[in-house]
Image (tube, grey):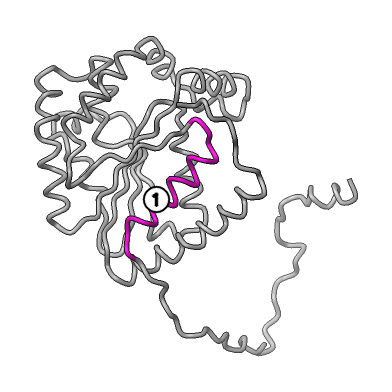
Amino acid sequence: MGKNKNKIKKKVYEKKLVELQGEMVKLQEWVKESGLRVVVIFEGRDAAGKGGVIKRITEKLNPRVCRVVALGVPTEKEKSQWYFQRYVSHLPAAGEIVLFDRSWYNRAGVEKVMGFCTEFEYEDFLRSCPAFEKMLIRSGIILIKYWFSVGDEEQEKRFSDRIEDPTKRWKISPMDIEARTHWVDFSKAKDAMFSYTDIKQSPWFVVNADIKKHARINCMSHLLSMIDYQEIDYDKITLPPTQENDNYVRPPMNEQTFVPDIAATMVGD
């Protein structure tokens, strides 16, 4: 994996991305109109490109229809609850799409490897997860799971890029640094997770993420193929005339505090 470096050309990528984002809008409208409930899970190693794909998927969408869930460390109260409980509260209502940027699979990955759960809790998760997901599917939820696979050489390159770029440094947490010393342990955990949860009702779809642009195009194309949607025909919108002025005099503009027009000073640069 990662040997083929024949990358898609930028112009071709950008054209295809615009096309896919247009289809995503059609999918969003179909989900809203049909009252579908869609859950998409994004998992994978650190710096595998999950966030980049999610960003491109949601870029043109209505955040009231398609929302991203990226939960932080559970509180003490949440730790005392049924494990799946805090995720259940974020599941979609009719007409919604929810993208989980990491999900309940934290237990099978970072919690297992880093010792944040007991062996009993881990094993109970592996047994319970397939039943939980089957229950979601029986309730009518469309569940799609993606695993972003990135090689260690490419991950190393992306980590170095994040360290050197101040605008990306926030993406690296102390946990990410610690996790690097457990590369093999995470591989074992992923394989065990797949052996239990890669089931017919909710299979894992693996995205080769060594080339970011390819991963984005491939994942978005696949996601669109997973839901039988149609373009909604809406009535043409006609804008009404604006309200006529009834001799109302507005306060002087100089009484308002405006943001400095920095852009105006850059004209001609």
Between 151 and 251, the residue placed more toward the observer is: 151
Between 184 and 97, the residue placed more toward the observer is: 184
Residue 183 against residue 238 in the figure, above or below: above
Q: Residue at x 57, y 54 (%)?
A: 16
Q: Residue at x 62, y 20 (%)?
A: 164
Question: Which quadrant of the figure has residue 9?
Answer: top right
The percent position of residue 25, horizontal first and vertical second, equals 46, 63
Label 1: state its secondary structure.
Answer: helix
The percent position of residue 217, horizontal first and vertical second, equals 50, 47
The percent position of residue 115, horizontal first and vertical second, equals 23, 15
Q: Which residue is mark 1?
A: 222
Q: Residue at x 54, y 30 (%)?
A: 4
The percent position of residue 156, horizontal first and vertical second, equals 51, 18
Q: Is residue 224 magenta?
A: yes
- Local crowd size for mark 1, using a 10 Å CA cut-off: few (<14), some (14–19), many (≥20): few
Q: Which residues make up the magenta segment?
A: 210-228
Q: Is residue 15 left or right of residue 63?
A: right
For the stretch drawn in magenta, the main secondary structure is helix
Q: Is residue 227 left or right of residue 16?
A: left
Image quarter of the C terminus: top right
Question: Looking at this rendering, what residue extends furthest in the top direction?
Answer: 181
Q: Amino acid at mark 1?
A: His
Residue 216 against residue 83 in the figure, above or below: below
Residue 205 against residue 19 in the figure, above or below: above
Q: Is residue 264 left or right of residue 116?
A: right
